Image (cartoon, helix red, strand yellow):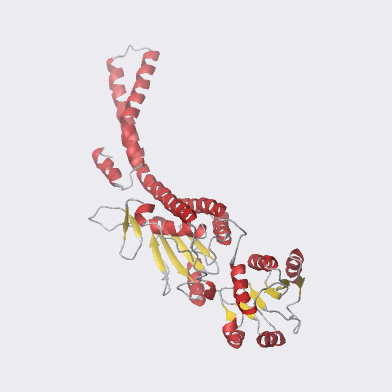
Amino acid sequence: MITMSSPTAAAVCPSADVMSDGSVALSQPADKAPPATVVALIAHARGVPSVAREAFAAKCHALQANDAVIIVHTCHRVEMYVALDAFGNGELPELPQGGERLVDAAAARHLISVACGLQSAVLGEDQILHQVRETFALRHAERALNPVLDRLFQVALTAGRRSHEWFGGAKRSLGDAALKEIEEQAGSLKDQAILVVGAGSMGRLTAQAAVRCEARVTVTSRTAERAVCLAESVGGQAISGDADGTLPSVVGVVVALSGPWKVQPIDAQRLVESGATVVDLSSPPAVPESLQARLGDRFISIDDLAWGPQTELAGELRDRLEQLVSGSGREYCQWLLARDSTPAIQAMSEAADGRRLSELEWLYRRLPNLSEQERALIDQMSHRLVGGILHAPKSALRHDESGNLSRAAWELFGL
């Protein structure tokens, strides 16, 4: 877990109001409650157990057809982002105990921090950036996304790409964290046997991390072809998961499956008797509860890895990341406010142009003998005059972080 200080709400969005629950809303007049634009419902392994997270995920995914909803679902987190103005009359799912509700600037800051790898168990890991990017791409492939959320994810992904350029050294993942747990029990993994159960993206990352530790890698998967392909790519061996008694002697097992691990009885007994550590990176757990119980404290779940080691960033890198999160959040808040001011700017421009045309008609009726060239010059001058008069008000509206000028424009210009 990162220990750098979080930017204040005011740093992310200078005119933001900090609510009693720590959430942030864009400033509104004091005589009415500030309405939220974006809401994030967060269920993370640090506060919500796996089973409860997956139950919450099912409720969230039931709403994913709504254009105003996008869901980030990983092994450690279920996060639903909602553009409230476009959501409609339905109800948002109830947060499980330990969940968190963030609004506006706080929601933006959170997603940006997630994309930067600052909320991960493995600080700076880039798997989460890939997952956020994939979530965004898949959502676009299915249907259009509300512009408020679309812009938020674009800002977060841009910040994420920049931050990951600053983290030096080999890219680490949860696979590294899992192997670290095994190493604490078995000692150095050099020339030790590690079993990777699963040949998906996390299984691949784990196998690659094991090779960096100079371990001997064995891979098994529900799909034999994928297991063979992964094993060959890391110089390991593949075994079948169908036959019982094929499990080799290993010091540790890392399970990364999207469903239950159907470990055979003899192999399960061998694991229990061998003293091997079993780390399950699946959510919900893939290892059967009966085997979990038999392994005792040698079983480590994905939730057990949620906090990760307390990592203190170097001062210069910490400052750069704080500025990146703050600046990206401020950019998004300013875009939101500018977007809200657009109708006022458009209405003001249309009203001014309407008045300009009306005055030109009055002038041309009184000067009927003007030539086409003279009329063109007068028309050009009127455009420049109106444009010059409106330049300062329009610029102020575009940079208005309070929203007060937009409301004033509607009243002062009779829009």
Residue 412: % across, % down: 24, 39
Q: Is residue 91 visible?
A: no
Q: Say whether residue 157 is left or right of residue 20.
A: right
Q: Is residue 345 above or below residue 132?
A: above
The residue lying at 61 percent from left, 82 percent from top is: 288
Residue 286: % across, % down: 61, 77
Q: Quadrant of residue 125?
A: bottom right
Q: Is residue 73 above or below residue 364?
A: below
Residue 346: % across, % down: 36, 38
* Number of numbered markers: 0
Quarter holding the C terminus? top left
Q: Is residue 392 visible?
A: yes
The residue lying at 71 percent from left, 75 percent from top is: 192
Residue extending farthest to the left is 31
Q: Say whether residue 265 is left or right of residue 321.
A: right
Q: Is residue 105 above or below residue 21?
A: above
Q: Nearer the viewer, residue 274 or 410?
A: 274
Residue 147: % across, % down: 46, 50
Q: Say whether residue 62 is left or right of residue 191.
A: left
Q: Quadrant of residue 398?
A: top left
Q: Quadrant of residue 338?
A: top left
